Image: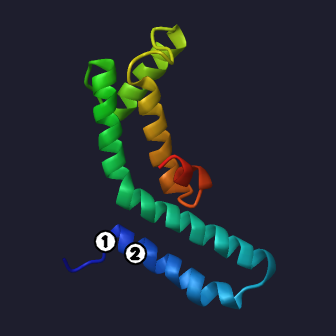
Amino acid sequence: MDQPSMRELVDAVREFLETKAMPELKGHTAFHARVAANALAIVSRELEQGPKSGEEEKARLRGLLAKDGTLDELNRELCKRIRSGKFTMDTPGLVEHLEKTTRDKVAIDQPGYSGLKQNA
């Protein structure tokens, strides 16, 4: 491939911010550079982990709901069933699905979160 991937581009900009720009910055500007670098790290993890976790979430939802659809459609159906009372915490597979989905999303957003290590 003759062009860098989106992840490579995001990682290059994040690395520049962290290694070149941030050491030169002070005060509020340094804070905003750290925020930008953290946001790019989240984007990088989403690009790396997001597709797999999304497919796994979709597969769990298909089994739980016994129907097919897009991830968005399946999540809306899950919410509808929970709101209506058709699904409760006693519904087989629901708690496991919610826990796994939450862990996957936190792993992308805050991989250093101590709760991830405790429940891994």
Dot 1: within a 10 Å radius of its alpha carbon, few (fewer than 14), some, or many (20 or more) residues? few
Residue that protrudes farthest toward the right in the picture: 27
Give the secondary structure at mark 2: helix
Q: How is the image coloured?
A: rainbow
Residue 69 in percent (x, y) is at 28, 27
Three-letter code, disc 1: Ser
For image coordinates 72% across by 79% down, the residue present is: 30
Q: Residue at x 51, y 8 (%)?
A: 85
* In this rendering, position of residue 58 left or right of residue 100: left
Residue at (51% x, 9% y) in the render: 84
**Type of the residue with mark 2:** Leu
> Which residue is under mark 2?
9
Quickly name the residue at label 1. 5
Report x, y in % for residue 11: 44, 75
Quadrant of the frame with the N terminus = bottom left
Question: Disc 1, disc 2: CB below 8 Å?
Answer: yes
Instruction: Say which quarter of the image contains residue 61.
Output: top left
Disc 1 is placed on an element classified as loop
The picture places residue 89, in percent across and down from the top left corner, at 51, 18
User: In the figure, is residue 65 to the left or right of 22?
Assistant: left
Outermost residue on the left side: it is 1
- Residue 117: image x %, image y %? 53, 54
